[in-house]
Amino acid sequence: MKKILVTGGAGYIGSHAVVELAQADFQPVIIDNFSNSRESALAGIEAIVGRPVPIYRIDCGDATALRGVFQAEPDIAGVIHFAAYKAVGESVDKPLAYFQNNVGSLLTLLQVMPEFGVESLVFSSSCTVYGIPDALPVTEATPTKPASSPYGRTKQMCEEIVHDVAGAPGSQLRTILLRYFNPIGAHESARIGELPLGVPNNLVPFITQTAAGLREKLTVYGTDYDTPDGSCIRDYIHVVDLAKAHVTAVQRLLDRKASAPVETFNVGTGRGNTVLEVVRTFEEVSGQKLNVLLGARRAGDVPAIFADATHAAEVLGFRTETSLADSLASSWLWQQTL
Ligand code: UD1
């Protein structure tokens, strides 16, 4: 079994990727500092995969601790790097923390990987790098725009750093950048899922917490956009589909099939849905009526974005499998276990 180091492997997307890796006969090794994840994710992972998964409670930006993991786990074949902060609003308040953590941990990883002969890296990027796009859907060739938040800038900077490092003379680094659209849902077992600490920023956990009575109402941020019903459009991808894209990407790197030192893929469904469509679909699948307030726009929101998923389909053979309705049903099932 090939060993894959998963930074941030106890987090929302990371935990689902760990499960898919284990089920594809890899040996995932988790590192996580639990700054935005919980120990309970580990029990969930082990319950699903039926075997223990090694976990190192360290900060990915701590080079000495990271070297210790590579020493304790010889023969790591590749790395999937999830560990990062991800709240847009918080990044405006704490820009230094975001640059330190998101950029710093990538730099440390890129420094330590070659010391141990590890050359394959899958990096979690975001559709946020496109800013407000001029045309939809966005392809990987769509120009990036200035990011609207320090969070978005860290993703852009990390992409550029990876290009420079992988392109340097003599570099053996092979990297796949996955630009995620909006991940939602939970594992079908309802043993792992999203665990937002405090008040959720993201739409779907806010919806499920409202349905569960933990929040009084859901505010729809803006109904005067130039979209069919006036609310924003996003591409909502089931987290297990997204997790599977990482397995495919890491396998491609290990098989030495990558056609360039850095390859970039959109990971979305290729479908756009409005916020109001998500609300309506959730009500249908859950049977719960939401208390909805049609509110003002949220600063920094992109009016509409969804993926052109052709490149990932043609090159990776990656296609999403889960509908919006099934994704939302899995979120609701998960919420009811909390
Ligand atoms: C944002 C980032 C994305 C990042 C993600 C991580 C941008 C453009 N996108 O996604 O890169 O990975 O955060 O958290 O920076 N909404 C409501 N009411 C709510 C919450 C959300 O109406 O209570 C709406 C938003 O206005 C938006 C949609 O739901 O139109 C999705 O919002 P959210 O889940 O926060 O994700 P993004 O902002 O798309």
Image (cartoon, rainbow, N blue to C red):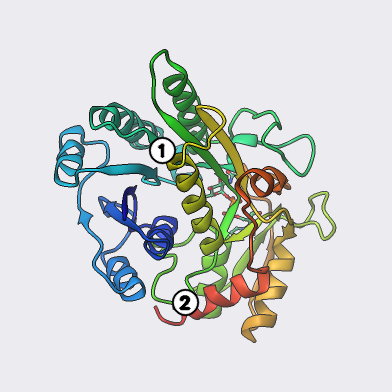
User: How far across and how far down the image is residue 269, in percent?
Assistant: 67, 56
- Where does residue 41 sit, x and y in percent of width and height? 32, 67
Asked whether disc 1 touches disc 2, contact meaning CB atoms under 8 Å apart, the reply is no
Q: Is residue 101 visible?
A: yes
- Tag nearer the camera, 1 or 2: 1
Measured along the vertical axis of the image, is residue 103 above or below residue 197?
A: above
Q: Is residue 24 left or right of residue 245?
A: left
Observer-nearest residue: 182 or 26? 26
**Residue indicated by mark 1:** 121
Q: Quadrant of the N terminus?
A: bottom left
Q: Secondary structure at mark 2?
A: helix
Q: Which picture quadrant has residue 24?
A: bottom left
Give percent across and percent down for residue 200.
47, 61
The image shows residue 169, relative to residue 21, as above or below, that is: above
Considering depth in this image, is 89 or 104 the residue closer to the camera? 104
Who's the residue at 44% across and 77% down the image? 190
Count neighbours of disc 2 (C-alpha within 10 A) and say few if under 14, some if 14 to 19, many if 20 or more: many
| Badge 1 residue CB within 8 Å of ligand 1 | no
Residue, disc 2? 335
Left or right of 318, for residue 258: left
Amino acid type at mark 1: Leu
Element carrying mark 1: strand
Q: Determine crowd level at label 1: few under 14, some 14-19, many 20+ residues with C-alpha closer than 10 A.
A: many
Q: Residue at x 39, y 24 (%)?
A: 172
Q: Is residue 185 left or right of residue 74?
A: right
- Dot label at residue 138: none
Q: Choose between 245 and 325: the one closer to the eye.
A: 245
The residue under the point 70% across, 62% down is 275
